[in-house]
Amino acid sequence: MQTITTIADLRRQVAAWRRAGERIALVPTMGNLHAGHLQLVEEARRRAERVVVSVFVNPMQFSDTAGGDFERYPRSAEADREKLAASGTDLVFFPSQDEMYPAGFENVTRVEVPGISGILCGAFRPGHFVGVATVVAKLFNMAQPEVAVFGEKDYQQLLVIRRLSEELCFPIEIVGVPTVREADGLAMSSRNQYLDTEQRQRAAALYQALRAAKERLASGETDMAVIEVAAAASLEAAGFRVEYFTVRRAHDLQPATADDAELVILAAAWLGEARLIDNLRLRRD
């Protein structure tokens, strides 16, 4: 496995693979890799001859970069390299902040996907999806893959990236991979390590609330507000601070109605210092 830190070297290697007629897949990450990330790599290997994984903690998508969430975001570069080498990754791209934003990220050209970026997580984390869209667009231009793979745990992010790719005419297939979960249902996340032992035991209540809401919808209930309020109350009783629990149309995240068939139930809630997000898809006949 190659480890590359500069855009120029990345482009040279990608160009060589393309001259050889090899298909390239990109897996963008912020590192601190777990089994969920490795599932993305596995999917990428199924879809391309060469797999590029980027590891970059993007300051532009954090609201607090000075001593806050950005500074304490978990980083494990050596462990990440070992996991990626064992997974069959061909190249890991470890750019520095200066390499990605040579003039600083505060005044850099930005990419915005309007509408969908300002709701749900975007409402609670202003500017977050502008940071995501900007760095993903840059990585698409740097690596020039035929396919890019993302996790469905960040469902809103996946839709933002799909729109970004379509509307900016990137010739890239965007692939979503189902959420990888712990044995008790908790979605795997780098932020789970913020949970202490007692909080970790309670954290699966988020998945349980999503499952309960899905069962109510599948049984024929159509009053979304009643389901949402009940689920949020159950999480508050379990010690969560709920940002949102909502039932939306799966294709555009607008509020769901009784006539919508393709639904997604999404939640974001704090447990101690960990902000947890999760979702479940549902198709109703």
Image (cartoon, grey):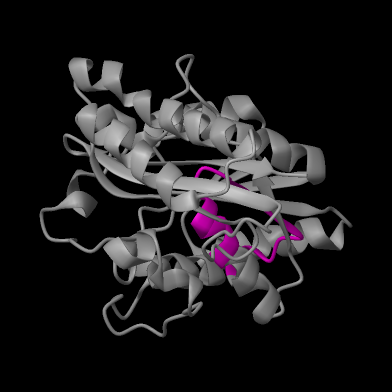
**Left or right: residue 29 compared with residue 244:** right
**Left or right: residue 196 compared with residue 109:** left
Query: Which residue is painted at 53% across and 32% down in the image?
Result: 36
Residue situated furthest left in the rendering: 67
Residue 152 part of the magenta-drawn span: yes
Q: Position of residue 69 (x, y in %)?
A: 20, 50
Magenta highlight range: 142-160
Q: Which quadrant is the N terminus positioned in?
A: top right
**Left or right: residue 14 compared with residue 80:** right
Q: Is residue 229 above or below residue 147?
A: above
**In this view of the protein, which residue sits in the foreground, 43 or 157?**
157
Residue 53 in sight here: no
Q: How many numbered discs sit on the rendered protein? A: 0
Q: Position of residue 214 (x, y in %)?
A: 56, 35
Residue 105 part of the magenta-drawn span: no
Q: Position of residue 46 (x, y in %)?
A: 79, 38
Residue 247 in sight here: yes
**In this view of the protein, which residue sits in the foreground, 103 or 149?**
149
Query: Which residue is painted at 57% across and 30% down in the image?
Result: 215
Q: Which quadrant is the C terminus positioned in?
A: top right
Query: Which residue is painted at 60% across and 73% down in the image?
Result: 164
Q: Is residue 279 above or below residue 42?
A: below
Q: Is residue 173 above or below residue 186?
A: below
Q: Position of residue 107 (x, y in %)?
A: 29, 85
Q: Is residue 27 above or below residue 114?
A: above
Res 221 → quadrant: top right
